[in-house]
Amino acid sequence: MKRMVIVSNRLHLNVIKKGKKLVFQRSAGGLATGLASFYKHYHTFWIGWPGVVNEGLKGIDKTQIIERLKAERSYPIFLSQKDVDLYYHGFANKTIWPLFHYFPSYTQYNQQFWDGYKNVNQKFCEEIITQIKPQDVVWVHDYHLMLLPRLIRKRMPEATIGFFLHIPFPSYELFRLLPWREEILKGLMGADLIGFHNYDYALNFLNSIRRLLGYEHTIGQIEVNNRIIKVDAFPMGINYEKFAKAFQISKVAKEIARVKEKIGQRKILLSIDRLDYTKGIPQRLEAFEAFLEKYPRFKGKVSLILVVVPSRTKVEYYASLKRQIDEMVGRINGKYSTIGWTPIWYLYRLLPFEQLTALYNVSDVAVITPLRDGMNLIAKEFIASKENKPGMLILSEMAGAVKELGESIVVNPNNKTAFVEAIKTALEMKEEDQILINSSMQSRLKRYNVERWARDFMEKLSQIKSVQHNLNKKMLDQKSQDVIKQHYMRATSSLFFLDYDGTLIPFASTPQEALPDERLLSLLSELSQRAELVIISGRDKDSLEKFFPDLDVSFVAEHGVWIKERNKNWELIEPLQNEWKKEIRPILELYVDRTPGAFIEEKDFSLVWHYRKADPELAVVRARELKDALLHLTSNLNLGILEGNKVIEVKNVGINKGLAAVKWLSRKEWDFILAIGDDWTDEDLFNVLPQKAYSIKVGLTYSKARYNVPSYQQVRNFLSYLADINTQTLGKG
């Protein structure tokens, strides 16, 4: 059985040095809590920082920590105070955290922080390499370790690596503010599978890698350095039964009874958060104050229990936020309190499980309204605690959990008026309606719990590794080349179909870049001496003649519209009409006007809308709109819509490279056939080839071709290999 190695900034156990004594406590963070609830049930090993710095430890302390953690199937990464200050308090929490949560004004761009972040990620890598085995599955977690997947990949190229981000991934416009943005993206893409809580975050990431690194994706799959990686969404679940059945625990039951005795008949609003500016705590207090002001009949009948868990007290913004909350609570209580009633019960501490779940059970309304949150498991825990019980959730539309808890009362935390009405609605809703609303969310949370989340991630990681393995099996290796070489040498009649753009040359941005170089011309000339060579391209016939004026080969232009055999004139593959251009061209011109950088190429029997030079994000939207419009316009015409590499082409239906290739294939029984292409338009060609033919797809994508090669350079190298055979065997056939 494969071992899962969890890697995170903090371990599930926290070490504190009190005098000469080491104290081990369960970590309170959401990540540690979520992962700890399932990791003991699997064959796992956890690597992370234990929470104590080197300066407070002696050699014997480290030995004791290692031995204690070994019993928990864990291993510590020891960090210095400087490491923690630069990497954790600095880059992670003063740069990444505010920027990724849409607080750019709080973000600090400090080179020392970045250097410290790189240094600690490297330390993690060095320790991990000593602890993991080749067959292990490495699961790296969260924003503290975004460089780690690539570092591990460099040391162990065949490793199975997953990465999960537990906070939002911001839009491109925010992410681009980061000076080290490309390094972060490249670090993440060392993983085989990159997971996010929801598709919005995944799409933001895919948009950033497209715009910053130029990588396109197909249904979340990206080809990076001859390797396929997958980007997907996995909403993290909770241990549902633990919270649904917590009231049955004697300690929890006693705590519930104690709290109920104190609150009497009053309604309870519950707010639980870490101290953080992303949580919207001041906005929550403002809304509660406005609620009491607008609906005075609730005075004395409802209280807000405000639980704030201390966090990152060394960061100045957090200390300032703490003062602001203290002052707001004091002002509201001072303004509205009466003898026997305090509007806000303020608890500034971490609550143990018994007290936390007791509050979930006794509260009438949970108010979870962050300004931005990756997921928010508290919202899920509250709903789980309300199985067959009344209780309403007011949830921010900016929380990741809203994608699964849409039946709750969803608010914009900045809309004070709507917030006030949401509180009123929650308090006045009939109990049977509350139970009914919660039941659908509970069914969902019960099905997709934390174990299901982890299992889904691991299954998808296994799937993408299988994809990589299958594609690697199709790679044109030396053994395959030798087989093809022997067949080619024995053949007395050989036929080559070669695509041009992306196959023989890289994709060109300018007409000058599209011209073949002398090496390519020489290579094709050598091949044509022993084989029937067909350049089969989407380019127009005039361009092909311009590119190859002296080459004794055959041509197929415009994806099969025009054919020119050696020493013959151009001819249409079949009689075609082009009167339809007058109707179609205006719609293409409209989308050129709406998409700066796009342009129209007119061929004899097709129109092509190019968007390679357009803004990538806008171009994707416009291409989708244009394709929909064209499909509608051409429904009664004998036209097809052809999508290529950043082009949309309108042409007569049924005309393709496969149809053109049949002209040569049907002529005689060829001893040797080779076809190479990079686009999905080449699939029509591969589809008509006889079983004995050799077909090669450029790029690591699924194809009907027998083999894959990473890029046009490998195509040239392979063709040069065959051309060398030409010089050795010329005249023998």
Image (tube, helix red, strand yellow):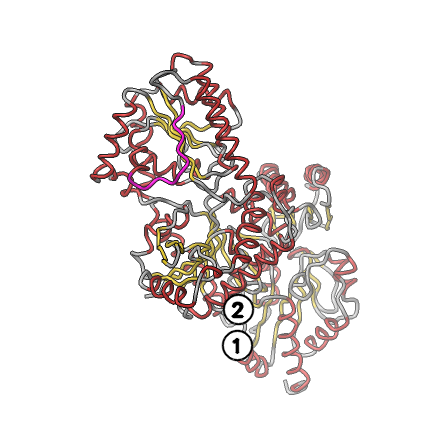
650 with respect to 315 (left or right): right
CB-based contact (under 8 Å), mark 2 and mark 1: yes
Distance from the alpha carbon under mark 2 to that under mark 1: 9 Å
Residue at 35% x, 55% y: name it: 24
**Residue 39 seen in render:** yes
Image position, residue 175 (x, y; %): 61, 46
Q: Amino acid at mark 1?
A: Ser
Q: Which residue is mark 1?
A: 480
Residue at 52% x, 76% y: name it: 480
Residue at 61% x, 75% y: name it: 494
Specify the quadrant that holds the C terminus.
Answer: bottom right
User: Residue 119 lies in magenta, yes or no?
Assistant: no
In the foreground, 635 or 301: 301
Q: Secondary structure at mark 2?
A: strand
Crowd band around label 1 with a 10 angstrom C-alpha radius: few (<14), some (14–19), many (20+): few
Q: Which residue is mark 2?
A: 707
In the foreground, 600 or 440: 440
The image quarter containing residue 250 is: top left
User: Residue 353 lies in magenta, yes or no?
Assistant: yes
704 with respect to 434 (left or right): right
Q: Which residues are magenta?
A: 344-354
Q: Secondary structure at mark 1?
A: helix
Nearer the N terminus, badge 2 or badge 1? 1
Specify the quadrant that holds the N terminus.
Answer: bottom left
Image position, residue 140 (x, y; %): 46, 57
Image position, residue 166 (x, y; %): 46, 47
| Above-or-below relation of 676 to 275 | below
The image quarter containing residue 4 is: bottom left
| Above-or-below relation of 710 to 264 | below
- Disc number placed over residue 105 in the picture, else none: none
